[in-house]
Amino acid sequence: MAERPVIRSARTAPSRGVAARRRELRKALERREGNLLRDLAHNPQAGLALAIALSFAVLAGLVGAWAHDRARVAIGRTAQDSQLVRVEFTRENTTATESRRESARQQSPRVYVGDQAIFQELESSFARLPRSLAQAESLENVALEIRSLFRLDEASLSAIRAQATADDGVSERWSAAVKSFIRELERTPILRAEEYQVQDISPGNRMELRLPGVVNPVPKDRALSVANEERLREELRRLARRAGFDDAEARPLVDRIAPPRGARATFSFDEVATQIERERAANAVRPELLVYKKGDVLLRRGEIIDASRAELILAEREAYRAAEAREHPLSRPLRGLATVTLFAIATLGASLYIVVFYPAGERRPSRLFLVALLALVTFFVAAWAAEVSPGAIYLVATLPTLFFASVLVIVYDQRCALLMGGLHAALLAATLQLPLAFAMALLVAIAAMIAQLAEIRQRTTLIRAGLITAGVAFLIVFATGVFERPVFDPTRDDAELLTPARRELVVDASLFAVSAMLVSFLTLGLLPAIERLFDVLTGMRLIELRDPKQPLLRKLAQRAPGTYTHSITVAALAESAADAVGADSLHVYVGALYHDIGKMNKPDYFVENQGGGFNRHSRLSPAMSLLVIVGHVKDGVEMAYEEGLPRSLRHYIESHHGTTLVEYFYHRAKEQAEENKEGAPAEIGYRYPGPKPQTKEAAILMLCDAVESATRALAEPTPSRIESVVRTISLKRLMDGQFDQCDLTLRELQVMEDAVIKSLNSIYHGRIAYPSSSGGEKSEKTRGHRAGQSVPAQQTQSAPTSGAPAPETAQAAKPTGT
C-alpha cells in the first residue's frame, strides 16, 4: 500500500451541519468496511503497527495498575469527602507507645563502672594490715606512711595486732571481715559530686553497678558522694560493722577509704552503656494498639489532613488490601488484568480512528511508535509526579496530558488531539482515582488549548493559546471547586475570608493555569524537535520555507529564472484554489514554489528558460528528450532529500505530473515511427512514473501547473479561452485517473476550476495598446498580458517541454513545458 504524504490541514473546513458530518462519517466507514481487513492483511507494516499498539496497551496498563494501587495522601490539604473504616484493623498508638518508651528510658537505671584497681588495693592492704603491724609494739614502731594512711592510734593498733597469728598470718575472722567489707563497698558506690547530683535527680529508683563479671542493680539511695564527708564516713563505719569489724578496727579502714578532704570515687558513670540499656528498656515496651471498627470515621469532610491522620488513612488502606488478598487471592491480578484490558480497549479505539480517518502516510509505524511512546511517557510522568507530589496534582498531573494533546494537534489535527487527549485525561483520572470534576476540568483545558492551535504561523500563537487556556483552566477549576469542595463549611467561622478549603481552591486553580502556560512555552521550545521527529510541518516552518532566501529557491532563481517565475505563478493559483475548497493553502503554496527545482540541472531544455533562443530538443530524438523532461522530477526529489525538505513537500515534486502522458514527444515519436514505417511506440513508455497525487493539495498543484503552462502558450488569452483551457485540462486529468488516489470530490474540482479561472483572468487581464512614438491611430484592440508584460510569440512557439497542449486552441499547437 503506497504511503501518502503527511499534510495536516491548517484550516478547518466550513461548517456543513451535523447531517453533513454524519454522511461524511458514514461514507468513510462504508469505504473502509470492505477493504480494511484486506488492506491490513496485505500491508507489511500492519503487523508492526499492531505490535506497537499491543506493546503500548500492555505497558500503559502496567503503569496504570501500579499507579492505581499506590496510596496518595496530601498532608495539609482539606478533605473533600468523609472516609469510613472499611475493614476492622488495629494500629499502633504511636503517641502513647512512644510516651511509654520514653518513660522506660527515663526509668532505666544509670550504669556505673567500678574502679577495679581501687578495690584490689583496698582488699590487699586491709588483708595484710594485721601481719604488717604484728611486730609494732607502739605507734613509734609503725611506719610513718602507714600511720598517715590509716591514721592509727594506740587503741586501733592494739586491736589490729590482735588479729595477727603466730604463724605470721591473720585470723580467719579478719580475713572474712575484709572480704565482706570489700563486697559491701562494691554494692555501695562512691561517686564524684557532679555525678552524684545527676544520679540523685534522675527519675529512676535504681542504678546499675558493673565490675568485671559482676552486675549489681542497687537502689540509687545507696550512692555516696565524696563531697558529703560526714555521711560518707558514717555509712562506711556502718558497712564495716556489718562486715564484722568492731569500732576500733573499723576506724582505720574508714580513714583509709575516706580521709579528710581526700575521698576517692569508686565508680564512674558510663554514658554509652547507659544509653544502650535505655534503648533496650524502650524496645522491651510492647506497642499500644488501637482497634478501629468497621464503620468508624477516619476523616470528616472539611478536616485538615495532618501527618497522623495521613498515617491512619494509609494504614486502613493497607489493612483493606491485606483482607482483600486473604479473602480473594486473585483480586490483585484480576485488577491488573482489567486495567490492561481497559487500556487495550482505549488503544484499539484510537487505532481504529487513525486507520479509518487518516491516510497511510499519517499512520506509518514510525509515527505511531513515536505517538505511543509519547503517550506512555507522559502518562507515566503524570502518575509518578502525582505519587511524589500529591499536593500539587493540579500541576504535575495536568502538564503532561496538556503537552501530549498539544503535540498531537501539531502532528495530526484538532479532532485527533481532542480524542486522544480526552482518552489520556480519562485514563489518568481513573488510574489516580481523581474526582470527575478533575477529569472534566482537564478535558475543557485540552479543548481550549487545541482550539487555539489549529494553525501555528507565529510564536505568539502558542503564547496566546497558553494565556487563554490558563484563563479557562482557572475558571473551570474554580467553578468545579465551589461545586464539590467544602468551601462553605458551617463548622468554621464564616467571617474568615480565606479558609483552608478556599485557599486550596485558589492555589489549585492557579497551579492548573500555570501548567497551561508552561505547556505553551514547552511546546514552543520543542517545536523544531517535534517537527523533525514526527515529520510534520507547521505554519511557522512553512513560512520559513517560503522565504525567497532559502538555498533551493535562490539557486532556482539564479539558474532557471523562467522556472522560478512559473513556480511563483503556480503557487498563487494553487493558493487561491486551496482557499476555495478549504485545503491547506499555505502548504500547497510552498509546495508549488519547490515543485520544479529539478529543472535547475538542465534549465535550457525547458521553454520558460530559453527566451526564444536555440531549441536544444531539435537535435535530440523524442526518447532522449523524454528522458530529459521526465528526469526533472527525479532530480527534484533527490535535491529535496539532500536539502532536508520535509516528506510532504517532496510529494509535490514527485506527483505534480502524476502518470500523465508527455504528449508532444509521444506524438513526435509516432510521427517518426510512421515515416520510418515502424510500429507505434507504447504510450506507457512516454508517461511520468508517478505517483499520482495522494492528497487534495497535490491534486490542486497538478491542475494549476498544467493550466498555467497551457494559458501561457495562448497568443491572446481571453477569458473564454482561459476557461476553455482550464475546463478541458481538468476533465482530461480526471478522465486519465490522476485524481483517483486523493480525496478530491467533483464538487471541489468544479470550485477549484472556478477559482483558477478567476485568478488567471486577473493575471492575463486586457490592456489598451498605446500608439507608437511616430504617431498613428490609437488601437482599440486589446492584447493579453501576463503581469503587465506581453508574451512574446517566439516563446509560445519554442521547443516543447513536459507539459500537455491545449488541444482545443490552435494557438497552443505545441505545449509550453512545466
Image (spheres, rainbow, N blue to C red):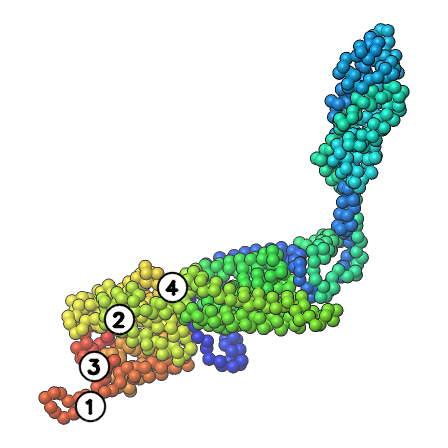
103 lies above or below 734: above
The quarter of the picture where the C terminus appears is bottom left
Check disc 2 and report the residue beneath it.
Answer: 564
- Residue occupying image coordinates x 32% and y 59%: 642
- Which residue is at the front of the view, 164 or 458? 164
- Which residue is at the front of the view, 751 or 517? 517
Q: CA distance from mark 1 to mark 3?
A: 14 Å
Q: CA distance from mark 1 to mark 4?
A: 48 Å
Label at residue 790: 3
Q: Residue flagged by tag 3: what amino acid is it?
A: Ser
Callout 3 touching callout 2 (CB < 8 Å): no
- Which residue is at the front of the view, 584 or 406? 406
- Residue occupying image coordinates x 64% and y 66%: 504
Foreground tag (2 vs 1): 2
User: Going by the picture, which residue comes out furthest to the left?
Assistant: 774
Q: CA distance from mark 2 to mark 1?
A: 31 Å
Foreground tag (2 vs 4): 2
Label 3 crowd (10 A; few <14 / some 14-19 / many >=20): some
Q: Residue flagged by tag 4: what amino acid is it?
A: Arg
- Residue occupying image coordinates x 64% and y 64%: 434
The quarter of the picture where the N terminus appears is bottom left
Check disc 4 and report the residue beneath it.
Answer: 647
Q: Residue flagged by tag 2: what amino acid is it?
A: Tyr
Label 2 crowd (10 A; few <14 / some 14-19 / many >=20): many
Q: CA distance from mark 3 to mark 2?
A: 18 Å
Check disc 1 and report the residue beneath it.
Answer: 781
Q: In this figure, what is the number of numbered marks?
A: 4
Which mark is first along the chain, 1 or 2?
2
674 lies above or below 70: below
